[in-house]
Amino acid sequence: MKKDIALLLVRLTGIGLAVGHGWGKVLALATGGGDRFIGGVEALGFPLPALFAWAAALAELGGGLAVALGIGTRVAAASAAFTMFVAAFLRHKFHLHFLASIGLMQPSPEVVKSWGNPEMALLYLLCFLSVVLM
């Protein structure tokens, strides 16, 4: 019983990803306002950035909802986890934030600010990876 409740709570993070992140991206891309997001994907070096932007947005929205509803859970969680890995490590540079926090590198405050905040993506990554492994 406790394990079921714990798994439900972890799976409910899918709603946060879907509504808090995926919905806005899908809506922006569908209405022609996703240029900034597509540009960000292109800056990460992905080929066909519009296609990969759509893939990421749908992984967040569809994957998050599927995990929350228990539909194709492992596949949905894996796609959402992969998307969050890209966000945490490629976009927000979690590994460099970590190295800076332990003093192994000293980037300027402007550089750190340009990386953004990786914590939310990392938390989603860990939650969805937990769902995949369970």
Image (tube, rainbow, N blue to C red):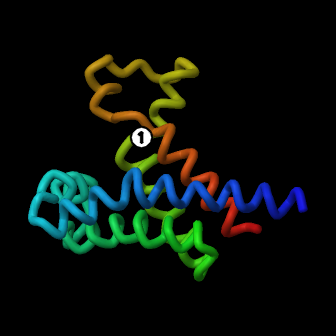
Q: Position of residue 28 (x, y in %)?
A: 19, 60
Left or right of 25, for residue 68: right
Query: Looking at the picture, does residue 126 appear above or below residue 108?
Result: below
Q: Position of residue 25 (x, y in %)?
A: 27, 59
Left or right of 118, for residue 57: left
Q: Nearer the viewer, residue 128 or 30?
A: 30
Question: Label 1 amino acid?
Answer: Lys
Residue shown at the point (16%, 55%) measured from the top left: 39
Q: Nearer the viewer, residue 132 or 48?
A: 132
Q: Nearer the viewer, residue 53 or 115?
A: 53
Left or right of 111, for residue 86: right
Quarter that holds the C terminus: bottom right
Q: Position of residue 60 (x, y in %)?
A: 42, 63
Number of callouts in the render?
A: 1
Residue shown at the point (57%, 45%) measured from the top left: 123
Residue shown at the point (64%, 61%) measured from the top left: 11
State which quadrant residue 109 falls in. top left
Quarter that holds the N terminus: bottom right
Secondary structure at numbered mark 1: loop
